[in-house]
Amino acid sequence: MDDRRIIELFFSRKDSAITELSKQYAPMMLTICSNILQNQEDAKECFNSALLALWDTIPPQRPQSLSAYCARICRNTALTRYKKNKAEKRNDQKSVSLEEIGDILPSEQSIELTLERQELTKAIEEWLSGLEQKNRYLFIRKYWYMDDAKTLAQNTGLSTSAVYLRIDRMKKSLLTHLKTKGVLQ
């Protein structure tokens, strides 16, 4: 079933909307949750919470890209759960991954005080569009899907050290780009 039809099922408040959405996007959503939380039970709970959030937000939202909307809801739900889990006990692997990119990007409060989120998003999208396909894949999989370097190496045919080197270069490139665009000082 296509995305437009699934969205119409949500607007009609039909239970089959969740079933059809799950058929289409459950693997992607569960992967996002699993990569962030590193716990299958938590990932499944998070996935179910994301489905509820989708039910609650469609309508009134009518996403242009259902897959991107599902990924965003799922990622945000998983990150909220991760922060809760982190408060209870530390998960250093994901802390490092999130903090690596956090070293480049300003904090939420800083963003809200100095510029609109849209400017930052536009600058990052512009930077991403200028990357070669393999580098864009690596960056998005590392910082959106939270894949580790070993998984990225297996998926791209690169060595783990090459993945680390490319990620490091891209972080520096992003920092330079954001400064050039005036998003960062």
Image: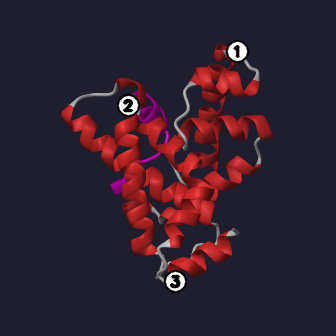
Give amino acid for label 2: Ser
Asked whether 64 falls inside the magenta stretch, the response is no
Q: Which residue is mark 2?
A: 95
Label ID, residue 118:
none
Element on which disc 1 rests: loop
Q: Nearer the viewer, mark 3 or mark 2?
A: 3
Residue sitting nearer the eye, 91 or 21: 21
Q: Residue at x 70, y 69 (%)?
A: 2
- Range shown magenta: 96-110
Q: Dots 1 and 3: beta carbons under 8 Å?
A: no
Q: Is residue 10 left or right of residue 1?
A: left
Give amino acid for label 1: Ser
Quadrant of the drawing holding the N terminus: bottom right
Q: Residues within 10 Å of mark 3 (few under 14, many from 20)?
A: some
* Residue 131 visible to the viewer: yes
Residue 174 occupies quadrant: top right
Q: CA distance from mark 1 to mark 3?
A: 46 Å
Whichever of labels 1 and 3 marks the residue nearer the N terminus, that label is 3
Tally the marks.
3
Residue sitting nearer the eye, 74 or 103: 74
Q: Residue at x 45, y 67 (%)?
A: 54
Element on which disc 2 rests: helix
Residue sitting nearer the eye, 156 or 102: 156
Whichever of labels 2 and 1 marks the residue nearer the N terminus, that label is 2
Give amino acid for label 3: Phe
Q: CA distance from mark 3 to mark 2?
A: 38 Å
Whichever of labels 3 and 2 marks the residue nearer the N terminus, that label is 3
Residue 177 location, x and y as percent?
A: 64, 45
Residue 44 location, x and y as percent?
A: 40, 45
Task: Using the image, determine if residue 62 lies above or below residue 151.
Answer: below
Label ID, residue 159:
1
